[in-house]
Amino acid sequence: MTTREAIKILMLSPFYFRLDSAARKLLIAEFRRSCAG
């Protein structure tokens, strides 16, 4: 999964927009890691 694909999925959640940029980066990385395995 690419970063762009992960962002598209995460943007469906209103919670995503409440996070600051550092938390978003961490969430994206964690989401990609969980989908990879």
Image (cartoon, rainbow, N blue to C red):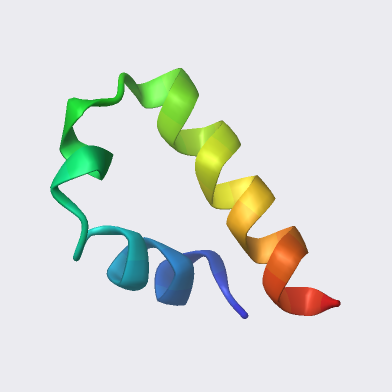
For residue 15, which quarter of the picture?
top left
Q: Which residue sits at x=53%, y=64%?
A: 3
Left or right? Give the position of 7 relative to 6: left
Left or right? Give the position of 7 relative to 11: right
Q: Which residue sits at x=34%, y=71%?
A: 9
Left or right? Give the position of 37 relative to 10: right
Provide residue 27's location: percent of width, then percent of height: 53, 41
Provide residue 13's location: percent of width, then percent of height: 21, 56
Provide residue 11's location: percent of width, then percent of height: 23, 59
Image position of 34 with respect to 14: above or below: below
Query: Going by the picture, which residue comes out furthest to the right?
Result: 37
For residue 1, which quarter of the picture?
bottom right
Provide residue 32's location: percent of width, then percent of height: 65, 64
Left or right? Give the position of 25 relative to 10: right
Q: Nearer the viewer, residue 10 or 22?
A: 10
Q: Nearer the viewer, residue 16 or 25?
A: 16
Image position of 19 with respect to 11: above or below: above
Q: Which residue sits at x=58%, y=75%?
A: 2
Total number of numbered discs in the rendering:
0
Locate the C terminus by quadrant: bottom right
Image position of 1 with respect to 26: above or below: below
